[in-house]
Amino acid sequence: MIALIQRVSQARVTVGEGAQARVTGEIGRGLLALVCAERGDTNAEADRLLAKLLSYRVFSDTAGKMNLPVRDMDGRGGAGGLLVVSQFTLAADTNSGTRPSFTPAAAPEDGRRLYDYFVARARESHPHVETGEFGAMMQVSLTNDGPVTFWLRSPPAAQ
């Protein structure tokens, strides 16, 4: 599984347009995680990726060093928000030509199952989790704080 994480001061996901638009997830300070399942991924990869994401130290401590994870981003046990959005395009193969291939991405039904599993486990482990809507056309707005962006990957065990 892959996650592109961004430290944000705010982020929001909207589905639909005009009068039909609705916000499906919104956070203040925290992490926006764009998440993608790859072919061969299992719950084990989702668990490893989530553990890494929740413990990845991207927030500043009192000395100004990136030493704090989202679950303790204020240094006093206060957790930040986590906005999880599915994004299968992270698995794109861009090595040849000018059109990406999405062959490395999990099949839609596997991707949905792993995304739902990832979100459920995140909600068990973190106090403030919001989401996008799997398979929907979404508008994601954010204010990247830093900017700070990292690409995390938990490859299938066979790789």
Image (cartoon, rainbow, N blue to C red):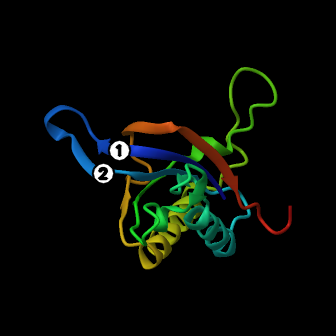
Decide if residue 104 is on the left or right side of residue 54: right
Q: Secondary structure at mark 2?
A: strand
Tell me if mark 2 has few (under 14), some (14-19) or many (20+) residues whose alpha carbon lies within 10 angstroms of its own. many
Q: Position of residue 42 (x, y in %)?
A: 67, 71
Q: Residue at x 68, y 75 (%)?
A: 44
Tell me if mark 1 has few (under 14), some (14-19) or many (20+) residues whose alpha carbon lies within 10 angstroms of its own. some
Foreground of the two, 34 or 117: 34
CB-based contact (under 8 Å), mark 2 and mark 1: yes
Disc 2 vs disc 1: which is toward the camera? 1
The residue at the far top in this view is 98
Question: Which residue does the numbered mark 1 point to in the structure image?
Answer: 10
Q: Quadrant of residue 17?
A: top left
Q: Quadrant of the N terminus?
A: bottom right
**Which of marks 1 and 2 precedes in the sequence?**
1
The residue at the far bottom in this view is 124
Q: Quadrant of residue 68?
A: bottom right
Q: Amino acid at mark 2?
A: Glu
Decide if residue 27 is on the left or right side of residue 49: left
Q: Position of residue 139 (x, y in %)?
A: 36, 37
Foreground of the two, 143 or 154: 143
Q: Residue at x 18, y 32 (%)?
A: 18
The residue at the far front in this view is 63
Q: Position of residue 105 (x, y in %)?
A: 66, 50
* Total numbered badges shown on the rendered structure: 2
Q: Position of residue 97 (x, y in %)?
A: 77, 22
**Image: 60 above or below 98:** below
The residue at the far right in this view is 159
Question: Which residue does the numbered mark 2 point to in the structure image?
Answer: 26
Q: Residue at x 38, y 52 (%)?
A: 132
Q: CA distance from mark 2 to mark 1?
A: 8 Å
Foreground of the two, 110 or 65: 65
Q: Amino acid at mark 1?
A: Gln
